[in-house]
């Protein structure tokens, strides 16, 4: 079992920055792939970024590429999402998620179905 708790959301002006954190419980955190997803009102939950358990592989949605950075600290059981140059369209509830790595150091996935543990979400609001 893995429990995930997000933090760091808030209200920011367009062009600003935020850093989200996701603290995980469980001794096997380092063997999970981690992902960030977001859900805006009236829309489906969508992929944002993913990172392999080694941290060596990452992948981003086109809408955030070059602006967001995902990172993890396995010693602290924490994954981060650094968000820069925020836009009003980034407004959403952001969720972190954990999924099995199937023994691969570099496995990553943008599919919701690849993740079986989810946090409760943190609200990010970007004003214009």
Image: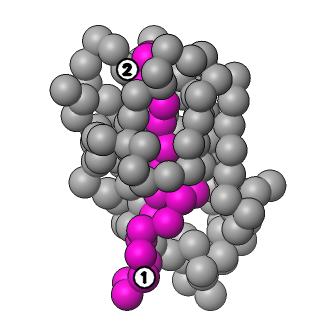
Q: Which residue is mark 1?
A: 43
- Which of the two residues, 104 or 122, is positioned nearer the viewer here? 104
Number of numbered markers: 2
Instruction: Report the residue at 59% width, 28% height from top.
Output: 107
How crowded is the residue under tag 1: few (<14 C-alpha within 10 Å), some, or many (20+)? Answer: few
Q: Which residue is mark 2?
A: 29
55 shown above or below 82: above
Mark 2 or mark 1, earlier in chain: 2
Q: Quadrant of the N terminus?
A: top left
47 inside magenta stretch:
yes
Left or right: residue 94 versus residue 108 is: left
Residue found at x 47% / y 57%: 37
The answer to whether residue 19 shows anywhere in this view is no
> Looking at the image, which residue sits at the far right?
66
Assign a secondary structure to mark 2: helix
Q: Which mark is residue 101?
A: none
Task: State which region is magenta.
Answer: 30-48
């Amino acid at each position: 079992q893995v429990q995930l708790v997000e933090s760091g959301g808030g209200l920011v002006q367009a062009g600003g920055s935020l850093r989200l954190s996701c603290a995980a419980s469980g001794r096997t955190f380092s063997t999970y792939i981690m992902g960030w997803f977001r859900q805006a009102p009236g829309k489906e939950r969508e992929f944002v970024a993913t990172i392999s358990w080694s941290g060596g592989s990452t992948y981003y949605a086109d809408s955030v590429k070059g602006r967001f950075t995902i990172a993890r600290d396995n010693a602290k059981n924490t994954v981060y999402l650094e968000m820069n140059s925020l836009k009003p369209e980034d407004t959403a509830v952001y969720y972190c998620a954990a999924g099995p790595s199937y023994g691969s150091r570099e496995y990553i996935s943008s599919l919701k179905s690849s993740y079986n543990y989810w946090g409760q979400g943190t609200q990010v609001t970007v004003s214009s």
